[in-house]
Amino acid sequence: MKTFSASAPGKFVVLGEHAVVFGKPAVALAIDRRFKCTVSEDDAFIVNGEKDDINKHPHVKHIMDIHGLKTINLTSESNLPSGAGLGSSAALCAALSCAVRHMLGKPFDAEEILKEAYAAEYGAQGIGSPMDTSISVHGGGIGLNLPDSDNILWSVKNRGQKWDVCDVHTPEMTFVIGFTGKRALTGPLVEKVRRYRDSNRFAKDIVDEIGSVTLEGVDALREGNKVKLGKFMTDNHKLLSILGVSCPELNSLVDAANEYSYGAKLTGAGGGGSMIALTDEPEKVSRAILLRGGRPITVNTGEPGVRIEE
Ligand code: PMV
């Protein structure tokens, strides 16, 4: 039986999560951890060698529906922890869309893969921006809604909101990710922030402030100015805490990492999941995270986006 494989990277958000849902700028970087999907045609729905119920796999179902497939044989492999805020479901959607398109003889087309992956992620989650799917598809670094961008990759519109996604060239840097071990669902956290922002002027100002911090941070990122970038990351963490998406576990890991870092913050939806630290001393940061009960992963920037695997 002929099989078709593709893989896509996970990511972390450097600056701007949550505010991006309201059209503010954000920046995300791909990490050297990937999700791989291998598919083949089959007359049953099979996941990792076992017959399965398609309704238990909403992301997979969405991609299959787009291509009019009722059954498929899917094997997945990943070294990305799920529920950790590292974009594993977006990486699954990007890799699966690419593999299915390859199986059906459709051309490799990053923008089409992005559209399919975002439709699947949004369909399964019911809320959110195209940030995670865009970084999984493009790799490297991406910015959303950056005012000075002349290299737009794609624009996505959904429910009255529009996101212009551009490439952000980033010098090589090392970050340590600290996973709290606490899994949190993105949808309810995004909804919580939406309710707070819609009902409270102060919360709206905080969202705007995250947008301003992100814009200043992007310049520091492009210049490779770690001192400045670290400061903006730390500021961003404080603003996210005010919005109510941090938690004691995240704050503890951020505190632990700060001693050996340029800056640290929660990354992604929060409520658990992971934090990131920008550092030249990844071993020391990793140890500090371990001592507080977190799970450290050292990552480097510059990972390529979705690709067919032979
Ligand atoms: O939970 P994650 O890491 O996939 O990130 C969610 C990022 C948010 O800005 C909170 C939501 C979104 O869709 O942009």
Image (cartoon, rainbow, N blue to C red):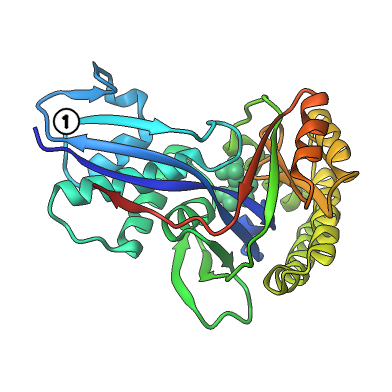
User: Can residue 195 be seen by looking at this rendering?
Assistant: no
- The x and y percentages for residue 246 are 78, 38
Q: Residue 155 vs residue 275: left or right?
A: left
Question: Which of these two is toward me, 236 or 219?
Answer: 219
Secondary structure at numbered mark 1: loop
- The x and y percentages for residue 283 are 76, 39
Q: Residue at x 77, y 71 (%)?
A: 216
At label 1, the amino acid type is: Thr
Q: Residue at x 24, y 19 (%)?
A: 49
User: Can residue 145 be seen by looking at this rendering?
Assistant: yes
- The x and y percentages for residue 204 are 78, 58
Task: Using the rendered view, name the quadrant where residue 227 is placed.
Answer: bottom right
Query: Please, which residue is most extreme toward the top here?
Result: 50
Q: Residue at x 46, y 52 (%)?
A: 136
The residue where tag 1 is placed is 71
Q: Residue at x 59, y 56 (%)?
A: 301
Question: Which of these two is toward me, 29 or 242?
Answer: 29
